[in-house]
Structure formats: C-alpha cells, structure tokens
Image (cartoon, rainbow, N blue to C red):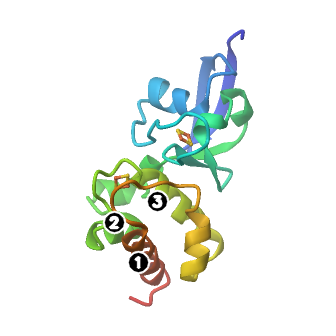
Amino acid sequence: MQEQVINFDLNDEPVSIYADPSLSLLKILRDRFNLLGTKEGCGRGDCGVCTVLLDGKAVNSCLIPAGKVQGRNVLTIEGINGKNQVKAGLMHPLQQAFVEKGAVQCGFCTPGMIMSAWALLQKNPAPSTEEIREAISGNLCRCSGYKQIEEAILQAAKVMTGQL
Ligand code: FES
Ligand code: FES
C-alpha cells in the first residue's frame, strides 16, 4: 500500500511517521521506533505478547494496521512508568510486583501481561482474582504459571491503591 503520514501520540509524545498504513502497529513500534519491549509472537492475535494500549484499551498490536492509529494514543511497556520515575531508576508497581512474586521467568510474555494488567487496573483498581484471570486470558505464558502472575497483579493493585 502507498506510504502515508501517520500522526499519533506514542507514550505521551506526539510522533509522526511516513509508512505503509497496512503494516502492523507491532512492526512500526519495533522497526521504526525501536520499542523492543513489545514482543512478536504468533502474529495472529493468539498469544498476547504484543499487547499495547490503544486509547487506554489493551489490544494485540500485531492485528492493528498502522493507519488505524492516526490521531490516537498508543502506550507501550516503555511508557507505563513515566519519564521521571525511569530517570530515578524506579520500577512501576506492576513491574516491581512481577519481580517480587516470581512472575517473570523467561520474560517473553511479561510486557504484554503487564499492559493487560495496567489496562485492568485503570478501570478497576481493586480487581478480584477472577477479574484478573479474565483480563489476562488473552496473554499466554509458557513458563511461570499463572498463579504468580495473578498474585503479582493483586499485589500491585494494593500498592497502587495505598493498601500496601
Ligand atoms: Fe500478537 Fe501473538 S504476536 S497476539
Ligand atoms: Fe516465559 Fe511467561 S515467563 S512465557
């Protein structure tokens, strides 16, 4: 498809690229912006490792044509923590909880898991285990087991709501 200008907000910064609008958002993020935290797995919406937020909603970036993000807001794992926190060397409570609870093993699924969890906690700051399970049901993990991941999300929710 013919290349076109695509303007959108990426991790709270306005960006503009000239690209084929039929390329996937995943490809654009990795190849054009070097945002390699968003992983590439199945490429067809089955594994969730490519999850990012589009206007606050968790989506599989491998299924989103780049042209569809025109004028919209994209958040990747690199953007969840805010520049000041990153500069200060601080992890986001979700990242911290994943480490503390042993929810990261090979780590391939982790960015996508955290993005799905982040989307959940934005609309439901104190989710039940069932609600967490539902929110991460599209994210596959082959090694850590889902229990540690659920516990990590529960812990992060408590930290983020001031209960821990
Ligand atoms: Fe996008 Fe698997 S790479 S869902
Ligand atoms: Fe390896 Fe989840 S930690 S796939």
Q: Which residue is mark 3?
A: 114
Return the disc, 1 or 2, that comes first in the chain's sequence: 2
Q: Is residue 145 left or right of residue 53?
A: left
Pointer 2 residue:
103
Question: Which of the pair 101/143 is nearer the observer?
Answer: 143
List the residue tagged with mark 1: 151
Measured as percent of width and height from the top left, residue 151 is found at 41, 77
| Residue mark closest to the camera, 3 vs 2 | 2
Rendered-image quarter of ligand 1: top right
- x%, y% of residue 116? 55, 59
Confirm whether residue 125 shows in the render: no
Of tags 1 and 3, which is closer to the observer?
1
Quadrant of residue 103 within the rendered picture: bottom left
Q: Secondary structure at mark 1?
A: helix
Q: Is residue 51 above or below residue 7?
A: below
Q: Residues within 10 Å of mark 1 (few under 14, many from 20)?
A: some
Q: Amino acid at mark 2?
A: Ala
Query: Mark 2 near ligand 2 (CB under 8 Å)?
Result: yes
Q: Quadrant of the C terminus?
A: bottom left
- Kind of residue at badge 1: Glu
Q: Position of residue 143 (x, y in %)?
A: 33, 57
Q: What kind of element bears circle 2?
A: loop
Question: Mark 3 or 2 closer to N-term?
Answer: 2
| Dots 1, 2 in contact, CB < 8 A | yes
Report the front residue among 151 and 69. 151
